[in-house]
Image (cartoon, coloured by chain):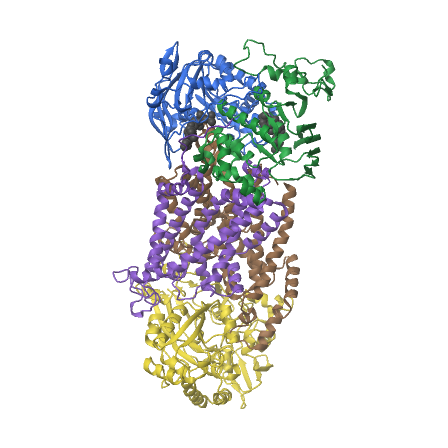
Chain colours: A brown, B purple, C blue, D green, E yellow
Amino acid sequence: MIKTIFKRLLLLVFVVFGVTLITFILSNIIPGDPASMMAGQRANEETLEQVREQLGLDQPVLTQYANYMQGLLTGDLGTSIRTQKPVLDDLLIFFPATLELAVLAFLIAIVIGIPLGILAAVKKNTFRDHASRIFTISGISTPVFWSGLLVIFIFYGVLGWFPSNGRIDMAINPPTHVTGFYLLDSLLSGDLVAFQSSLRHIILPAIVLSFAQLAIITRQVRASMLEVLEKEYFRTAIANGIHGPYLLIKYGLRNALIPTITVIGVSFGALLGGAVVTETVFGWPGMGKYVVDSIAYLDFPAMMGFTVFISIGYVLINLVVDLSYYVLNPQIKE
Amino acid sequence: MELQPQAESVQAQPVKKSALLYKLKKNKLTMVGAVILGVIILAAVFAPVLTPYNPNMIDAANKFQGPSWSHWFGTDEVGRDIFTRILYGARLSLGLGIVAILIAAGIGLVIGTISGYFGGMIDQAIMRTMDMVLAFPTLILAMALAAALGPSIQNAMIAIALVKIPVYVRLARSETLSLRESLFVKSAQTFGIRPFRIIRKHIMPNSVSPVIIQGTLDVGDAILLIATLGFLGLGAQPPAPEWGAMISIGWKYLLDFWWYPTFPCLFLFLSAGALNLIGDGVRDVLDPRSSR
Amino acid sequence: MLEVKDLHVNFQTFRGTIEALKNINFSIAEKEVVGIVGESGSGKSITALTILGLLEKNADIASGEITYRGDNLLALSKKEIQTIRGKKIAMVFQEPMTALHPTMKVGEQLSEVIRRHRNVSRKEAKRLMLVALNDVHIHQPEYVAKQYPFELSGGMRQRIVIALAMAAPPDLLIADEPTTALDVTIQHEILQLMKELNEKKGTSILFITHDLGVVSQICNRTIVMYAGEVIESGETKDVLYTPQHPYTKALIEALPDGKNANVPLKAIQGEVPNLMERPIGCAFASRCSHVMETCKTNPPALAHWQNQHDVACWLERG
Amino acid sequence: MTAIIEMDQVQKHYTKGKLTIKALDDTTISIAEGDVLGLVGESGSGKSTFGKLLIGLEPPTGGEIRYQGAPLWKKNKYVRRKPGELQTVFQDPQSSLDPRMTIKEIIIEPLYALSKNERKQKESYDNLLKLIKRVGLKEEHLERYPHEFSGGQRQRIAIARALITEPSFIILDEPTSALDVSVQAQVLNLLKELKEERGLTYLFISHNMSVIKYMCSKVAVLYKGNIVEIGSTEQLFNNPQHPYTEILLSSLPSLFENKEKAIEGFAETAQPKGENSCIFYEKCPRRTDQCMTSPALESRGKDHFAVCHY
Amino acid sequence: EEGGEPQSGDETSASAQTLTVAMTADQGTLDPAVTMDNSAWKITYPAYERLVEYDGASTEVKPGIAKDWNVSEDGKTWTFTLNEDHKFADGSAVNAEAVKFTFDRTLKIGNGPAEVYSVISEIKVDSDYVVSFELEENFPPFLSTLAANYGGIVNPKVMDHEKDGDLGQNYLAANTMGSGSYELAEWKQGEYIKLSANKEAKVQPGISEVYFRIVGDGATQRMQLEKGEIDIAEGIPTEQIESVQSMDNVELLQKPSLLVDYVYVNSSKGNEALQDSKVRQALSYGIDYESMIDVVHQGYATPMRGPVPDGLWGHNPEAFQYELNVEKAKKLLSEAGAEDLTLKLLYSDNKTWWETEALTIQANLKEIGVNVELNKVAYATSREMMEKGDFDLALGVWSPDFGDPYMFMNYWYDSVNFGLAGNRAFYKNEEVDGLLKQAATSNDQAEREALYHDVQDIVIEEAPYILLFQKDFVLPVSKSVEGFVYNPMLEGIYNLAEMTKQ
Ligand SMILES: Nc1ncnc2c1ncn2[C@@H]1O[C@H](COP(=O)(O)OP(=O)(O)OP(=O)(O)O)[C@@H](O)[C@H]1O
Ligand SMILES: Nc1ncnc2c1ncn2[C@@H]1O[C@H](COP(=O)(O)OP(=O)(O)OP(=O)(O)O)[C@@H](O)[C@H]1O
Ligand SMILES: [Mg+2]
Ligand SMILES: [Mg+2]
């Protein structure tokens, strides 16, 4: 097991290398000139040259890449063309916010999605199954900006229960930075006011963001559960008097979990990426907006940095997913 | 000693077909899904008959009209009839979304089962490549691919298909890992059946279920993604009546002109729902056990 | 203790309705060991599954009543039947290979069931689990407890399944071909174990098998099924040594007697009828060596022959 | 008669953590062409493992297995000389059948390992019909799926599948344990006929001694991964040499045996004191101090060997 | 906090000391020597002072740090005498050295702003409070450029923050070091930027704290405005403006702006037919200007008259303006032999209304038989395509950086800029070039105005641009806010120091 983990971590380097290389190649394919974006509309050729030189864009692509990788090894992700600040600094500001949102959304999706999927499977083709289907499909097929806006309109505009935007009230000082997660940090520092405020701020976007993943998890759990419910051993367990949650979880869910975990792992990446729209709608100060702006601006250092971050996160999560296969099905050989 | 064949031995019936029908009929929800999708498709095909408007005709005087008899779903910011645009858009959006996912799911299933079945170096190579693809934020990758392939609607579709492949690879592979150890696969191995046939005949049909579930859920996402690419100039160009684009432009008007984003959303929801119902049905049909 | 009355079970399939059980009547008294024998597909397993309410969704219990100590099992609510399964009536399934949770260690599976029925602590359950494994003659119980089913031999799995069913121990044990995968020595031990359970704890046993040898060894009474019907029943020795139904006779003749390896075994000619289109008359008519005209048109009912020995055949009634 | 299978000091050990399970330990045996070798033994004694090594499902951890003189395993890689030559019927029919294939597809599946011509020829519908009728299935079953059958019917499907390639050597792992007596009779008859017709060789794994007696020309008795006795069926049944064989024979429940005959069972379990004691020491009713050292395989007559001091 | 009562967050904004502005996006760098993004200027402008300032709502300048100034005969030397009581936030004096430092720094950094000042050849410190600029050539708009954001005087102490020879760029990207009434107090990225009063500033503001809050979504801004959580909402699109008018607590400011919306007609590199001025005229005749304004901006815009917008000197109210005339357009096209014309219209999502605009143009031109294909691309891509001339028609907006018609006339029509910003129409006319050169180097405003009028007549006739409209500045502002004066040169910039709140 440890050997496998170690091997996979080595491969992580390979993945990051590949990801950056591809990004780099792509950055040269996508039409657009970052220098011109930076120098502004009215810059003349000289200024452009100067900016290019400054950004190192005048060098051959391979040299640029080599420079980038060299920087990467020392933890230097370069300087953003758009914000003129080190990309790492920018990402460290935005990443925790996105991560906090994604993790919470993720938890919501799992906590609701798995039981809902089990229920739908057990009650196949009953009212409850259909209700869960409608609920989850509306989750996946209503775009986040639509549902997000509606939620803001209802819970902020009409009812006024939740704030519309931001991570915490402007008047409240954010908790001291430990994890970068406001919810955790405020609890750690015992600042209940901050906790309450950040909870109220995160709840709507997290729910909206979780909605689509919830659908996927629910449907996948349902499908795999249905397969398990038909298995002989499940019937044996019932005949032996096993029933209730233990039956559903240990005998059912456990064996239905492999495809579910797989989509969960994949969807966590999607959550990080999908946070973009949610963040825009809810004015959530996360990476999503930063990246979208960077894309529009062709801010490659920022895009690369983001990609590196996400890919490391992604690979780590899916490493856990892959390892979980061995636990979930001991017959699978490492 | 040879056993005597029964005199009244029944003629081999074309059971397969009847089994299919039986299952579909029994699965009322699948029928519901098929009917919904069928109606949408028919409406799209007969759009010119069903609506007097041209989907791209601008009628500035009638912009932002609410739903009425003359404009069932109202009009948009330049006075185009939303109902008409939804019908015409169905051809584009549904078609592209479904095809993109079919491609992605198909390729993903093949690669995933191969990767899972062979394991070892092949598996590592495939999965790390997939990790790379997946690790990219979908949008960046789709954008880059669409840009590299050249902006056209087909290429946008291909880009989305490519971006979506890894999900299916992972799903198919995870199922394969378990199936590979099952006795019926092992017995096929003992016959000396070649790996590719084992994958095709034994692994794929048995690992297709999560792929179908994911696929039918993904179509809606693909439609929205096509719209996003459209914004970056990489997909369908305006004024193509594409659902995703209608939604993404229209959502800003939700509070003032609710009908604008809502009806396209509704159709996306209906199609996604219908596809999902059909997907469940297909899964059932493919699974002989569920016919009992 | 258990009485099955007029049981009819059909399966709805797209090909039509399968009449899997037709007019089944039998009972099991306290402390009794009853055997059901019959060809493959004769409805033995379905009978067992019906008792525990574990039929597939497409099954339709057309009529009948199964009373267990006064309760009609078929009318019980889900909650009520749950308290009966495993604790009062337990079942050993036919196919040991797939009857175990594939990804849970066998010890864990067993201790869970023990905990459910005996209300003991985790530690105690573990101890009892090891005892139970030992009871079914598993060598190195500590080691095997930590193995997954796929790491065990067929016979070992079957013994685990048996241990599971006997965990409570139940009042009635339904054992559906529990020893098919066992070698004779172990089979012998398992049969001893069941006998012991029957004698010491008073557990009644419904023993489904097609191994007539086993039946002769353990069962007080034997029921012979054919095509979803009971065609003969009575004291084991009566049924086996003085079989009345031609089908029963044929079954006995089909056994290799261990004497002459050069003479082909006497298999029963023909096939079990298609349960979707039952013949109008006796279901065995087409294979029967003593077939008469009436057999083809009139189905014989199960009728008393002599001291508790019932037969469904026109022949025996002259 | 030439040996079709030769096993030389073959062992298969499973290790899990510190424990090692010797599923098969230093087994040397050969199966002659046209033989039916019965393999009996306690459950878990390694019978199926024996089969798995031959069919390529598990590599041996030691020793060499030769099929028609050529090694079957080369460095954990199974060498298949000619597909369809070696076939198996598994103990567990349920999980050995692909749930998503119809019976017809399942049965003809092994043909896909053959050359196209050969397949075309064996795949013919008549051929198929004949085959399924021989194993007691009906034509209408062909389009059904495995779950629609009873346990016995499934095993017949598995047998039909093994027969379709017209193999020369079949491993039958408890092929009839799931069958009712009537079908068992049909199947055994069938197997026997086929053997005569085609000169097949069987490895017949079973625990039903009367079936073994009926089917086999030679019998090997396995105990805890070791062959404790091997000999022709006649000799072994009439003159068992190893105490375990005796117990096996006597515990046979049969309608025809005298039920009153006292069964000589296992002895109370006794822990062996040394590392090298006889493997049966623990349960042997005739153990003595001599058994503290392990006995060697000795000849007890023509082609009859046993591992016992007595 | 049940039942729709105001959040604790708006207690702050309810206070007279706090103003909250909702803006749609976060800002990039705040370094005046780097940023070319005028939405960032709303933060930097109040944090810095310039030698001269725009005067109220007019495009003329008034004294700022400089109390007076003069220009040499040849127009090449500008001398400024500074006020002696302006102080940076750290208390140090704003003097001639600081002025010289600022401009030297900008030129050395060499980004977009340097381009504006590229005419400067040398800056001299004549005494502590007198500074003079030597220009390479006569450049009359020079004074005006000093009032723009890049003219903000930076505290030379920024060099204390220099890293790797970046002249403090990194520091100034997220900090301010000026003498304006405000300084940057806090910047929570992605959430808000907070300005607070600069204690050392000469002009002390009435509102001590200003929050620029990032609220990406217009609908949300609207709800926040209605609830009084914000005072100014920048991001409400004109389609939703109607609903703002019904809010009791909000007033809608509407002023003509200098933001001009037009179509580049690629006169050299696009479709060959476009090289014929008749075709270009036909296009200009093909647009329904009135309805365009209605559809695209709900009427919140003014039709153009010539390229120089109303509100900037040099504007000619008499200039010819095309009107919709389908017949004429068709006739012109057939004269030019350009029937069945198909043109590619390039635009991006840079401006929210462009999509509608493009659709309308497409529909309009269809009437005159010109088939328009829409080509919507990412902003950066559109920039590159424009640079390369890879389009037939392209949407553009333009607003002046300094208050001089030079910003329009010279940028757009001078072939010096052929294919560069402004002249993306790839327009070239030697006569025009000559006149523009003359206008750019004369120091006589009347003469310049006349010259520009002449040029306008020619370029309107030649029609390399379809001049669509001059967008109105529309801003919903809470009624509690007073003293806001809109200066068309300072689009999106607030005169915070003069504003108050009840
Ligand atoms: N779910 C089902 N749908 C349709 N037919 C079924 C179903 N389950 C069982 N049957 C049919 O019912 C009949 C009785 O089956 P059952 O399993 O009781 O046989 P059995 O007596 O246990 O045979 P065996 O000894 O082979 O296990 C068989 O013909 C079988 O094909
Ligand atoms: N994959 C495995 N991992 C670990 N141990 C295994 C594995 N497969 C088999 N064994 C062990 O090997 C031994 C022999 O198993 P095998 O299946 O050969 O027995 P068998 O003689 O066929 O028994 P039965 O008659 O019960 O089928 C058993 O103790 C079993 O637990
Ligand atoms: Mg059965
Ligand atoms: Mg075995």
Q: Position of residue E293 (x, y in %)?
A: 35, 73
In the image: residue A333, left or right of residue A256: right
D119 relative to A195 in the view: left or right:
right
Q: Is residue B241 above or below residue D26?
A: below
Q: E89 or C22, which is in the foreground?
A: C22
Residue at position x 29%, y 67% from top? B62
* Quadrant of the image containing the N terminus of chain D: top right
| Residue B24 position within the rendered picture, expressed as x and y whole percent measured from the top left | 37, 43
Q: Quadrant of residue E332?
A: bottom left
Q: Give the quarter of the image for residue B191.
A: top right
**The C terminus of chain D, quarter of image:** top right
- Residue at 53 percent across and 62 percent down: it is B144
On the question of residue C145 being in view, the answer is no
All told, the count of numbered labels is: 0
- Which residue is more in the foreground, D78 or E392? D78
Image quadrant of ligand 1 equals top left
Residue B55, by quadrant, is bottom left
**Which residue is at the front of the view, A233 or E337?**
E337
Q: Is residue B235 above or below residue A314?
A: below
Taking depth in this image into account, of A134 and E168 the one nearest to the observer is A134
User: Percent position (x, y) of residue A170?
Assistant: 45, 56
In the image, residue E409 above or below residue A161: below
Q: Residue furthest left?
A: B69
Q: Is residue E26 visible?
A: yes
Residue E273 vs B238, above or below: the answer is below
Picture coordinates of residue E25, whole percent (x, y)? 46, 63
